[in-house]
Image (spheres, helix red, strand yellow):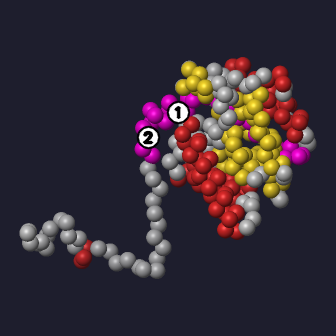
Amino acid sequence: MRTPRADDPQIPDALSLEPVDPYEPQVGSLPRSEYSAEQMENVTKTGTTTVGLTTDEGVVIATDMRASLGGMFVANKDVQKVEQIHPTAALTLVGSVGGAQSFIRSLRAEVNLYEARRGEEMSMQALSTLAGNFARGGPFFAINPILGGVDDDGHHVYSIDPAGGVMRDEYTVTGSGMMVAHGLLEQEYESGLSNEEAKTVAARAVRSAAERDTGSGNGVFLAEVTGEGVDIRGHKDFDEVC
């Protein structure tokens, strides 16, 4: 057996180690992205259109139903891109499918743990902050969802960017069809809409985007969020709701 020497690199030099304060908090580091710039660029080319509106009665979220590869090939024509993640909140799926699905599962788990430990529902402010922290520090890969929910403080819609930024607004749009959808909302959205009126406006915004954006189309999913819960319905024909 080899006898260790004092200059052996496998043995740390105790004299060279900085003293550690046992009472000082230890700060970790955020994980580095394992994806190249080229991979990130390709993911951002995947298409969708998601819309979130606040109303007098709650929140309405609309998404198209198409999953595409780079906006050039339709991989699936019946994708539900909005999911309930909280008793009175829903989140859209935008960007990488795997990253978005993992993001939703993680948020659901945290919401359930919060409610089990505290015996109360998480507020939308807390949920949006948690979502932003996850997007910034987690391995969820190029997501840009919309979070919409209702709590004791009112009706809320947030857009969450891939860097973890959280922006609250009365209405917002994300995805490759956002410019067309935003143009329609600028003219048709107004404060005081009922949920039924908002569903028509949101569906029209998605339909307008689908007319010009190759990554969006094949129908619309509408999520209605109130203090009673979340109701999500799909419509293959835009004329049913527009």
Q: Which residues are magenta?
A: 33-58
Residue wearing tag 1: 43
On-image quarter of the C terminus: top right
Image spot of residue 41 (x, y percent):
50, 32
Residue drawn 42% across the image and 38% down it:
36
Residue wearing tag 2: 35
Amino acid on which disc 1 is placed: Val
Image spot of residue 43 (x, y percent):
52, 33
Amino acid on which disc 2 is placed: Tyr
Placement of 182 over or under 18, stated as above or below: above
Q: CA distance from mark 1 to mark 2?
A: 10 Å
* 64, 12: nearer the viewer: 64
Mark 1 lies on a secondary structure that is helix
For residue 18, say whether it is visible. yes
* 203, 224: nearer the viewer: 224
Does label 1 or label 2 sit earlier along the sequence?
A: 2
Structural crowding at the residue carrying mark 1, measured as other residues with C-alpha within 10 Å and reported as few (<14), some (14–19) or many (≥20): some
Image spot of residue 29 (x, y percent):
45, 59
For residue 186, say whether it is visible. no
